[in-house]
DNA sequence: TAACTAGTTTATAATCATTCTAAACTACTT
DNA sequence: AAGTAGTTTAGAATGATTATAAACTAGTTA
């Protein structure tokens, strides 16, 4: 057992999720990284198929990613509506979105500031604000 | 022929789109309004079925909405990735999005101001910036 | 260790929005 | 009146996601 495995087993147990082979593999793929990571379920499947011998079923990938999202380890990002992207950076932050390449790039929270905030409709409160800066080739 | 029909026929012709029955009906549903209007293809189908005797096929609804988008009469909005919404307000503007009710509300451009704008990645330029304020019950 | 139970995984089927297809139809031109 | 290019249409196809239900497994208890 590698060192990181032990960490993920701990993490999963603490979240009330049983540390199964599949979940540990997915943790390693997603969280064993320097930078935060954007991915689709399809990306995740490809990475697992390439880097691991074990097969993980598509349903498990969906189940696990949703479980991790529920626990706050992943954030779902909805841009360009075709498919869902997930982000290992779960803090509120903003994105560049390249319409041509469909690439998503995190923006450091400090690099953006909203000056004037609008009044929400009656009986509602603002719980989050996210800016998408659409970009294209110069 | 009503007055508005004539206007839409003109508008369609000027855009290089043949003024068919179906397109004129859709224009009336979408553009004969005081306020700007958010809708899904499904919404549009329902409205047409309710308010019109003529049936319009689903494919035509998609074709027409996409044609109108291409001509700049509609704007596609991608929030909460399940389905596409379209907006008759084609200017760059911001939205409140109610996660519970899935409702989308326009924000007046003057009510929001971005103070600090991040530097885009190399070779890219920012073409648009849109803020989504997620709201929920107080 | 053996047996139990609730939580998981899995292959497959089902669903739902959207796009494709190809045949019938129609606006506009000549 | 005929031609042709653009449109509409029903239905099939696609692709992401979710549901299903049977097989499997982690953790508990005896």
Image (tube, coloured by chain):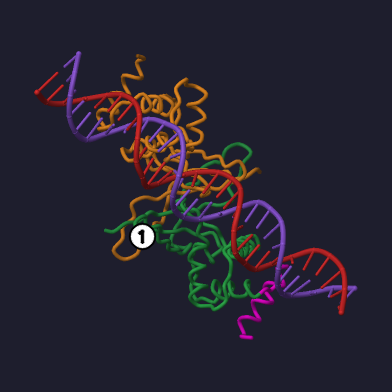
Chain colours: A orange, B green, C purple, D red
Residue B52 at x, y = what percent?
53, 78
Residue under the image location 31 percent in, 60 percent down: A124
Q: Quadrant of residue D21?
A: top left
Q: Quadrant of residue B120?
A: top right
Front residue of this view, candidates B53 and B73: B53
Q: Main secondary structure of the magenta part?
A: helix
Is D22 rendered above or below residue C29? Answer: above
How many labels were placed on the picture?
1
Residue under the image location 53 percent in, 65 percent down: B89
Magenta-colored span: B1-20
Front residue of this view, candidates A27 and A95: A27
Is D29 rendered above or below residue C14? Answer: above
Quadrant holding the N terminus of chain B: bottom right
Front residue of this view, candidates B107 and A41: A41
Is D22 rendered above or below residue B85? Answer: above
Q: Which residue is mark 1?
A: B101
Residue under the image location 31 percent in, 21 percent down: A7
Q: Quadrant of residue A10?
A: top left
Question: Is B14 one of the magenta-colored residues?
Answer: yes
């Amino acid at each position: 057992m590698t060192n990181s495995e032990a960490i993920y087993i701990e993490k999963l147990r603490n979240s009330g999720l049983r540390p199964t082979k599949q979940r540990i593999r997915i943790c390693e793929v997603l969280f064993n990284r320097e930078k935060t990571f954007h991915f689709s379920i399809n990306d995740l499947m490809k990475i697992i198929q390439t880097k691991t011998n074990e097969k993980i079923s598509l349903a498990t990938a969906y189940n696990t990613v949703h479980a991790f999202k529920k626990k706050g380890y992943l954030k779902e990002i909805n841009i360009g509506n075709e498919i869902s992207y997930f982000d290992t950076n779960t803090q509120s932050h903003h994105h560049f979105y390249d319409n041509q390449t469909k690439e998503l790039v995190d923006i450091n929270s400090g690099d953006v500031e909203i000056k004037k905030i609008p009044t929400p409709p009656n009986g509602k409160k603002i719980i989050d604000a996210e800016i998408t800066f659409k970009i294209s080739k110069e």
